[in-house]
Amino acid sequence: MDRPFDPLFILAVLPRLLAYLPVTLGITAASAAAGSLAGLGVAALRLSRFRVLRAPASLYVGLLRSTPPIILLFVVYYGLPAFLEGAFGPGAQLWPRSVFVLIALSLLFSASVAEVFRSAWLSVDRGQYEAALSAGLSPFQARSRIVLPQAAVSALPNFGNALIALMKEGALAYAVGLIDMMGQGILVVARNYGARSLETYVALSLVYWALTIALERLFRLWERRLSRGRRELAR
């Protein structure tokens, strides 16, 4: 017989889920950092004048953006150890599950933010760069002082959206046995033999909802501060 919905169970299970919040945030932060560095490199290749550099970067972005996150996670988790074992001998099977999750999410994030960085860079009027050169700035100074600050403001909203998507996609880590908030929620449901599953998933939804709102407000505040100088110049 089904049990009636119990809102109090949501409050009871929240501390058990929040105990694994550092794992969820750690995976998200580490993947975002690694993916951002890789994304910058890919974006630079995509902006290159040379087709031999642009073509593989475009292929990289296209392949990863068209691969479902769960499939990429399984390919990395099962495929990387097999590849490394064939090339260098056994050993990768002993790596923590978090390593494979970080690799998969970093690859996924790098493809997304590469397009964010590229489009933000292209959004800055080329004339401003040329004007900076004519004013006596070096190409490096023109890019770092004129183009980069404006591109950062343009990239921030989409970067924030990509980060929020990454955090939610990280919930798939339970599929390879990593216990984060989602994994703990699955364990709670299993220990209750499937009972209280609705309450558990509602509790998880509330946590992710709160995290998403916090990130949105943080990026909105950051964008407002970076845009302050631009607004003052426009007056």
Image (cartoon, rainbow, N blue to C red):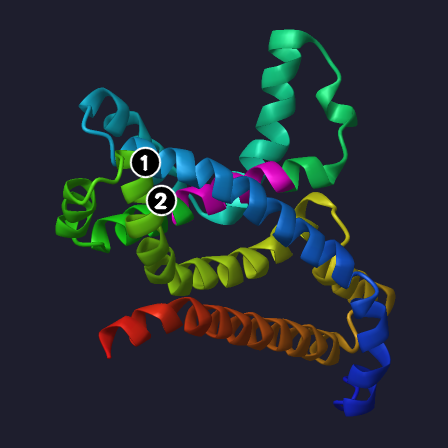
Left or right of residue 61, residue 124 in this image: left
Residue drawn 64% across the image and 46% down it: 30
| Residue 75 in sight here | yes
Quadrant of residue 161 within the rendered picture: bottom left
Q: Position of residue 145 (x, y in %)?
A: 34, 49
Query: What crowding class fits label 2: few (fewer than 14 Cα within 10 Å), some (14-19), or many (20 or more)?
Result: few
Q: Position of residue 76 (x, y in %)?
A: 57, 33
When the figure is inspected, residue 120 is found, relative to residue 224, above or below; the finding is: above
Query: What crowding class fits label 1: few (fewer than 14 Cα within 10 Å), some (14-19), or many (20 or more)?
Result: few
**Secondary structure found at label 2:** helix
Does the magenta portion include 167?
no
Left or right of residue 159, residue 199 in this image: right
**Does the CB distance between marks 1 and 2 fall below 8 Å?**
yes
Left or right of residue 154, residue 11 in this image: right
Quadrant where the N terminus sits is bottom right
**Secondary structure found at label 1:** helix
Q: Nearer the viewer, residue 71 or 230?
A: 230
| Residue 6 in sight here | no
Identity, as a three-letter code, of the amino acid under mark 2: Ser
Q: Which residue is mark 1?
A: 140
Can you tell which mark lies on residue 97?
none
| Magenta region | 102-112
Identity, as a three-letter code, of the amino acid under mark 1: Phe
Q: Position of residue 31 (x, y in %)?
A: 59, 45
Quadrant where the C terminus sits is bottom left
Quadrant of residue 168 within the rendered picture: bottom right
Seen as rendered, the residue at the extreme front is 136
Can you tell which mark lies on residue 144?
2
Q: Position of residue 49 (x, y in %)?
A: 18, 28
When the figure is inspected, residue 56 is found, relative to residue 150, above or below; the finding is: above
Residue drawn 60% across the image and 8% down it: 87
